[in-house]
Image (cartoon, rainbow, N blue to C red):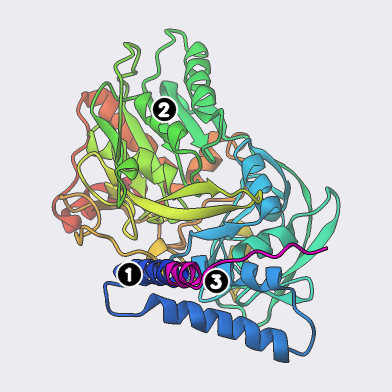
Amino acid sequence: MQEKVMITKRTFYILVFSAVLAIGLTLNFVHQSFAKENDGDDDGLSYLKNFTDVVSIIQRNYVSDVKLSDLVDGAVKGMLTALDPHSSYLPPEGYNDLKVETKGEFGGLGIEISMRDGLLTVISPIEDSPASRVGIQPGDQIIKIGEEFTRELALADAVKKMRGPKGSPITLFIHREGIKELIPVTVVRDIIKVKSVRFRSLEDSFGYIRLTQFQEDSSDEFHKAIKELSKKLADRQLKGLVLDLRNDPGGLLNQAIRVSDEFLKDGLVVYTDGRLESQKQKYYAHDDGDEPNFPLVVLVNGGSASASEIVAGALQDAGRSLTVGTQSFGKGSVQTILPMDSGAAVRLTTALYYTRNGRSIQAQGITPDFIVPGKTPAPLKADKNVEKLNSIKESDLPGAIKNPTNTTPGTKETPLEVKPGASAEEDDLPIRKDLMKVPLAELLAEDPQLETSLKLLKEWSTTGNKPVIAKEVKVAKEVVSEATTR
């Protein structure tokens, strides 16, 4: 039996009026919020209506049924991709993969990729990975993954397609500048164990440390490497060190700060600036009492990005090192991972990095004190069709955030330009051999950037004074040409 509820006419009108007033106030608040976000120029509600209209049209007219969840996920991915090259939507699986990567072990091919003109483009292969062993190079464009074209494919989706069980093969179809036909490359997936720090001795008590990426244990491994290099010497004292950050795509910020702090006693390492107060952070070096004072040269190139640029910039600004190589990548933006209740996450650009002297790294990078082009790897020299490979920078990526400081890249002084021998190609690509096992004489002959670094360390160690950056490039060329030409 239904129970009837009796209300008076006066009460009914009061309830209706209250409901209308509540709806009106809510709509007005939403309208004002959107208007504020759009600076009063556009009606935010109209854009939301456009979105719902498009969803409705698709659901009514598309050739097959489409899940609403798929449409919303696609819209979210597109919305974040439209912001800048590094903001993205991470579905639960992708978010878990990201957490695994920072620990230094994951399954896949071993390449750092980004989007350029809607195409998957290789930034850098990870050292001693399946991708590097088959000859994939920085600048290669991945046109197809298997039989699927990659144009306009979301970066996270591309990564997912290239992941797979250890031992399973995958064929990539690559476009390389100077070659008309697509190059099919079959790569066998493997567990990618990234050893972030490797080291060896150079002649006359000088050391070399290669840092491939910044992961959870990088700073501890770096500290151990310096100790191990010193132990091998009779007086346990290094005369100088080459820190190789070439093709280091970056990684964890705290590890970059700790590696920088290894050589700095005080002052800023890096700071960030964003819209929110929480994104305005300053990170300082600390005097631990054991900072080495030996000469230091940092090697960078177009594949050095993000955390590696922070280290290079901090040491350069502090006057603690000399920087050798070519212009770095220029990724100076901070991505914050914002987890969601669904298990997914949003990777959102929330701030920009600045060096201790106030230089923004974004879309500018670090200009070396001594510009030394690299050599083309020997396996590519035999291919007459290979021309200069792409040299991709952050500023080349669609939607890249512009540098806010609007200054000329690099230091105040003109960088010294060192030209290798006439037979060398200026592709700025390091050789693909194992740098830790190649005989030193052969290594220096194949790597003019490292050769120049060692010469600078010897001069610095002998004279006790850091080599001066030339103010006139022409003079600088004459001074060093005899020493660097082979």
Q: CA distance from mark 2 to mark 3?
A: 36 Å
The answer to whether residue 332 is visible is no
**Left/right of residue 183 with respect to residue 418 in the rendered view:** right
Labels 3 and 1: the sequence-earlier one: 1
**Left/right of residue 71 with respect to residue 207 in the rendered view:** right
Q: Quadrant of residue 365?
A: bottom left
Task: Give, as a three-letter code, the residue at label 2.
Answer: Arg
Whether the magenta-drawn stretch holds residue 17 is answered as yes
Q: Is residue 98 above or below residue 199?
A: below
Does the residue at mark 3 contact the one at mark 1 (Cβ under 8 Å)?
Answer: no
**Left/right of residue 208 with respect to residue 56 in the rendered view:** left
The answer to whether residue 269 is visible is yes
Please give the label number shown on residue 78: 3
Residue placed most toward the observer, 169 or 440: 169
Image quarter where the N terminus lies is bottom right
- Residue denoted by label 2: 258
Q: CA distance from mark 2 to mark 1?
A: 46 Å
Task: Give, as a three-letter code, the residue at label 1.
Answer: Gln
Q: Is residue 385 above or below residue 160?
A: below
